[in-house]
Image (cartoon, grey):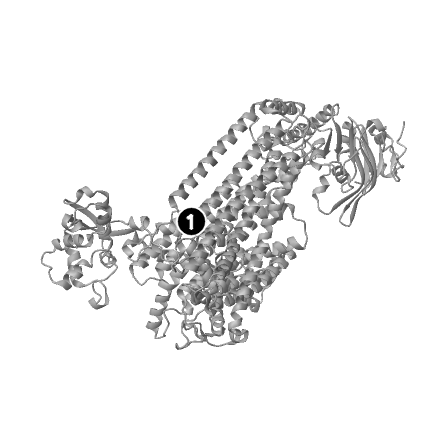
Amino acid sequence: MTDTKTSSLVPSAVYDRLRRRRAAERRFRFYGLAAVGLALMMLVFLFVSIVRQGYSAFTEHVITLTVALDPAVIDPEGRRNSQSLSSADYQRLVRESLAALFPDVTERAERRLLFGLLSSGASHRLRDVVMREPARIGTTVVIETPLDDDADRFLKGLVSPDVPESERRIKDRQIVWLKALHAGGGIHNRFNTTLFTAGDSREPELAGILGAVVGSFYLMLTTVVLSFPIGVAAAVYLEEFAPRNRFTDLIEVNINNLAAVPSVVFGLLGLAIFLDFFGLPRSASLVGGLVLSLIILPTIIIAARAALKAVPPSIREAALGVGASKMQSILHHVLPLAVPGIMTGTIIGMAHALGESAPLLVIGMVAFIVDVPVTPLDPTTVLPVQIYLWADSAERAFVERTAAAIMVLLIFLIAMNALAVIIRKKFERQW
Amino acid sequence: MTYRASNDPPHGTVGAPRVEAARAKLTACNVDVFYGEKHAIKDVSLDIGRNEVTALIGPSGCGKSTFMRCLNRMNDIIDICRVTGTITLDGEDIYDPKIDVVHLRARVGMVFQKPNPFPKSIFENVAYGPRIHGLASGKAGLEEIVLTSLKRAGLLEEVKDRLHAPGTSLSGGQQQRLCIARAIAVSPQVILMDEPCSALDPIATARIEELIDELQHNFTIVIVTHSMQQAARVSQRTAFFHLGELIECGMTEQIFTNPLHRLTQGYLTGRFG
Amino acid sequence: MGTLFCDRVRAIAGVVFQVVLGIVKDAVRQGSTRLFMRMHVLMLIAVLVLVSVFAFGIGHSRAEAMTCPRHSLPQYHGQCAALATFLPGLVVVALWGALESPFALILALDRLAETPLSPLAAAEGHFLTAEIQALAAGHGSRKDPALMMAAQHYAELRQTGFVLMAVLAVGASLGGWALAWRRLTPACRARNSIEHALKIFMILCATLAVLTTVGIVVSLVFESWRFFNHVSLMDFLFGLEWSPQMAIRADQVGASGAFGAVPLFAGTLLIAGIAMMVAVPVGLFTAIYTAEYAAPRFRALVKPLLEILAGIPTVVYGFFAALTVAPFLRDTGAALGVAISSESALAAGGVMGIMIIPFVSSLADDVMIAVPKALREGSLGLGATRSETIRHVVLPAALPGIVGGILLAASRAIGETMIVVMAAGLSAKLTANPFTAVTTVTVQIVTLLVGDQEFDSPKTLAAFALGLVLFVATLFLNVIALQVVRRYRQQYD
């Protein structure tokens, strides 16, 4: 094949043709490789762009303030009960302690700029300290409190000082103060614990994903509790018992089609049936779980049927041969052997459900919820919906937090898929 | 010899498909089996004698396995399969709707072509049957049944120090003896063996054949086999099937030395099959 | 074995008792009527469970004590007794749960009708029920005395009803137990009964798949029907203007709202078309490479990597499209002098295309692998090059499967929601220009429903009409795709 060139038997027209065919072959192959390369590049580009936008959200700048807990401000009447303590004017204390660092700032407008560096969460931190230890009133305490998101973004280098002052939210004067504080050690950068310990907030520096993570957990719990037994029971019936007739054919066609119905349509189903007809509470993970169960049920049934089918008939015969009933042969032998396959399918279905957000928007799980849910009946938000809400926010500081939340979501998904792969590898059985 | 009066002589079958009424364990009368449209077994009548080995021989696809699977209603699990005629076990119709098929299969055990131990321990494999039938009282009773069964299957010596190893870790011949132990653990009256040696090497086959020899004192055994030598070695009576019909039946010696039917002769001399 | 079992039952009973105690304490502490009601039901179910556990234990030991040979193992007799005890009670509770609230409401409204009403209250029949329920739960706002009385009556009815139901449920349970007790004989086929019950449960589960479809169709059709009472079907399907903002007061501008969905269909097709233009060539060539050229190890590595693309949540793609791709396209367009909207169809469609690459490539790869080797060898044996073999032999043979995959991908693209919600606009323009913002069916469904809406305004109902169109379209694509793929499979199986 390589020495066609030297062969005198091949006329030159055929030789030319052959050369063109070879070139076409090379081109075709290159297209294929390019397509693979392009697709993989997209994947890499997606991950890189998210990490690049989100990594900065894992740290935050905090300012260390020394606050004098003046009893005259906190509790002028000296009652020391929790009501008066919780409603005291902590903001004033915090602001005074910041102003003390810059004694030359006295003008009202300037002072407002200065206080703008602080997060509104600072006073809440101080209140927590006082509520925990009322005995410290009258002394001074040192607290660390997050900076305002604009100041934080500037210190992270996300806002360039070269941009004209009118086009950025952080002003030149504030930059000077920040630099002074930074140089004096009053500000330092640390791991952003708020992101993982707080619920949602209007202030980016106070917003966290804990509420969404807990909500997602409850949602997944509801989903798996509902869909796993039903899915497995349906699969066992269809694979082991169902006679071949029109009704079971109908069920099969149905399941295959349901697997491809857009999830937003399931949201409409949930809205019409669970919310409007049965009057279940909006925003609770129960309703979301019901809808997601219906969405992943086909996945579980299809996976479970495949796993059941993979158990060889000789096992069934062996059990029947010693006098087990059909149900016993399935419950004692076939189903346990199919469990790894069913688990794998279920985990993949759950991973799918974890990333699902469109049906949840439709059934109204998009409320702004600050509190971390305690039970599955509490109103809650979930991770993908939180991502949607943050991505929609005007504050630039939410962009990095959105990307960070996406990273957390992707880590959960990767962990789930890895678990599925491990189960499959570990229990893979050749019959 | 006294034949039952009610028995019409099965047309087409030569030899002696019937045994004395008192010695008959299983009796099949005019059994037909259909797989959908296919007529797999045609009007077969045959007695299986008590405590003896009956071999079913014939070319592939002749229906011998199908017939045997009627004897403990394993054909029930195939949707399109339909059985007509009567089969009685100790005079009791096993296709009577009042019969619980599960109890029937406990009385008529089965060993399959390919060794099919459960992917569980050796002990669990044998203990499963007694457990679901509630045969053992307590743990000690169960253990006793398991050990006895393994011993009778001639496997105990080889596995007694690894009862909790997986059953699938045994060699092919050992697996098949494990399956026999599993079958006899529920104390069946009849054991059906569907080509039990076809997946085994000659040495393992010899062990199984010895075992069959011993087991026939306590059990009624029906064996389907491809190997005429094996039928000759282990069985007392032989039935020859061809294209779904029972062609000839009789004492093994007689069939092998002096077959009555032309087809039997042809098969035994290797002219077809 | 018997004593051990009794110990276990006692332990379980202990746990159940503690749970019940916990619930009671909780209920007392929380004090809310509604919560109390819910806890009551949980408590009742706990009682039923407890009774069933006892029924199980007693049935088990009675069966164990039998001397004559019994049909089934003791555990099946026990389960039988437990089931016979639990199910009747549960049925009573379920029936009550479904019927009590509307029933009590009717009675309460009757009571209300007997008393003279304030004219204001008489006008709003539907609103009244909600108000009564709110008042009964202790957080109603209107202190109309007639309403208050009705609410109190309603609450009392529910209380009495609950007690009645509880007695009935426990009675039914005990009755069931008594029946099971009498049936517990050695000849009783307890195992068969249990297996039968289990099988019925399995059939119900399998039927749920059909019920889901029925639920989807019924709810979509029903709500759409209500929508078409407001807006004519023709206007909806062929109207060219979409502006669903309904005025709250009649004198506002744009009071009617326009529900012509053609711009939405056009936008959907535009975005899905862009997505397919990305996904089909890339996916197809990827499949050709992995199935025909790549070494098995390369294929084993690349295929799962590509499938990650389909596993990434769509909200992530939405973020990527809205915050990375769209600004990039806008800036590039500005540099080139092309006006690209920051919510362009191109950004949404392109990113969606990336997402559905694996839908095309995976199925195409599978079907190409399944093309018999003999066909390939026949062609290569004639001196065809590999690419010629692929183009003239493998692709035509695999075509039905590939088409099926593409159709499934298209149905996915049409039904995709989050990417377009986040990256495509809301403006319903009838245009084929990929640089402008368009809106899609799914975007409108979400937009119409997000936010507090009255359930029967045409605006909300329009979402269901759009959902019906979406469902029918995707179902159509799926059915064809599955048929095509199935026929293809039969060809080579």
Q: Position of residue B158 (x, y in %)?
A: 61, 24
Question: Going 51% across and 28% down the picture, which residue do you hit?
Answer: C7
Relative depth, front residue between A51 and C36: C36
Relative depth, front residue between C304 and A377: A377
Q: Position of residue A380 (x, y in %)?
A: 39, 53
Q: Position of residue C465 (x, y in %)?
A: 51, 67
Q: Is residue A43 above or below residue A315?
A: below
- The quarter of the picture where the N terminus of chain C appears is top right
Q: Is residue A62 above or below residue B130?
A: below
Relative depth, front residue between B121 and A198: A198
State the residue position of label 1.
Answer: C33
Crowding near pointer 1: few (<14 within 10 Å), some, many (20+)? some
> Looking at the image, which residue sits at the far left?
A104
In the rendered structure, the residue with mark 1 lies on which chain? Answer: C
Q: Is residue B263 left or right of residue A405?
A: right
Q: Is residue C226 above or below residue B152?
A: below
Total marks drawn? Answer: 1
Whether residue A70 is visible, yes or no, is no
Question: Going 56% across and 64% down the picture, which residue do you hit?
Answer: C477
Q: Is residue C393 left or right of residue A409?
A: right
Q: Is residue B144 left or right of residue B246?
A: left
Whether residue B253 is visible, yes or no, is yes
Q: Position of residue C142 (x, y in %)?
A: 39, 60
SS label for mark 1: helix
Relative depth, front residue between C55 and C210: C55
Q: Amino acid at mark 1?
A: Thr
Q: Is residue A342 left or right of residue B187?
A: left
